[in-house]
Amino acid sequence: VTIVEGSERVLAAAEPEASRIVHLAMEEEGVGILTGTRVEAVSGDEEGVELTLSDDSAITADRLLVAVGRRGSAGSLGLENAGAVVESGFVQVDGRMRAAEGMWAIGDVTGPPLLTQKALYQGRIAIEDILGADPDPADYTSMPVVTFTDPEVGSVGLTEDQARQQDRPLAVTTKPLESTFRGWLHRIGNTGLIKLVADVGENRLVGATVVGPNAGEILGFLHLAVAQRTPLDALVGLIYAYPTMYGGIGEALGAYGRGVVRVLDPATHPMYDDPVIEV
């Protein structure tokens, strides 16, 4: 298998550290990965296909899988005649999923991110609105995302780069999964990390990424913390079950004496001498 990726790294929307771990894991399994490369031409017959790449090289293969994303096609439904607004092929909705008088829309038809969990979330809001229950408007700021590679990648909230673009006062910690209690015991298949992005001014996590076995399940704890704006010191004060994968979150936070939570004002407090922590 050879992956031809136009972006400079795989999983370009994820944290760079997560992309690197997945990249290396796939290469170790024999998958070739060409980043920053595009397919310029394809030819083939019943025997196989040949791809001409942007660096003037060529690849031959038995099969070609084209996975370049999806685009909306709601413009062909005539919804404008009922008062709906369609932009770039997607139906525009308000916070309660209303597209027009007497019309609600949910799921991929409403546009990115095209995620099942988004559709389920929107469905609940639409049903409550239809029944007159006056639901809270949709809020996507803590949308969880899981990529089911091996190892899995789960994320919620802002990446470090996104948070820095907002000029937030940040403390960032990256904890290798293999150096956590459970990760060390896990041994085989313990490659991964827990990355936490904290706004020290607001005293809370604004983003998190988990890479490793069952990362999507570990993410649930962080999803709740980000969505509910849980104070950092409340998270560090918890008793984490030992030894568990989610317990690595406590280690990264500083529940055992080291981590981002102990420093809430980097201007007046020295950061711990830990190379994986940056402010």
Image: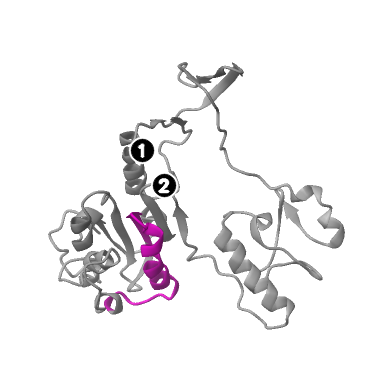
Which quarter of the image is occupied by the N terminus?
top left
Q: Earlier in the sequence, mark 2 or mark 1?
A: 1
- Residue stretch in magenta: 208-233
Q: Which one is nearer the viewer's eye here, 35 or 86?
A: 35
Q: Position of residue 278 (x, y in %)?
A: 23, 57
**Gap between marks 2 and 1, in whole Å?**
9 Å
Which residue carries the number 1 mark? 26
- For image coordinates 29% across by 79% down, the residue present is 234
Q: Amino acid at mark 2?
A: Thr
Could you tell me if residue 95 is visible in this image? no
Count of residue discs: 2
Q: Is residue 156 left or right of residue 234?
A: right
Which residue carries the number 2 mark? 149
Q: Amino acid at mark 1?
A: Met
Q: Which one is nearer the viewer's eye here, 263 or 14?
A: 14
Q: Is residue 174 magenta?
A: no
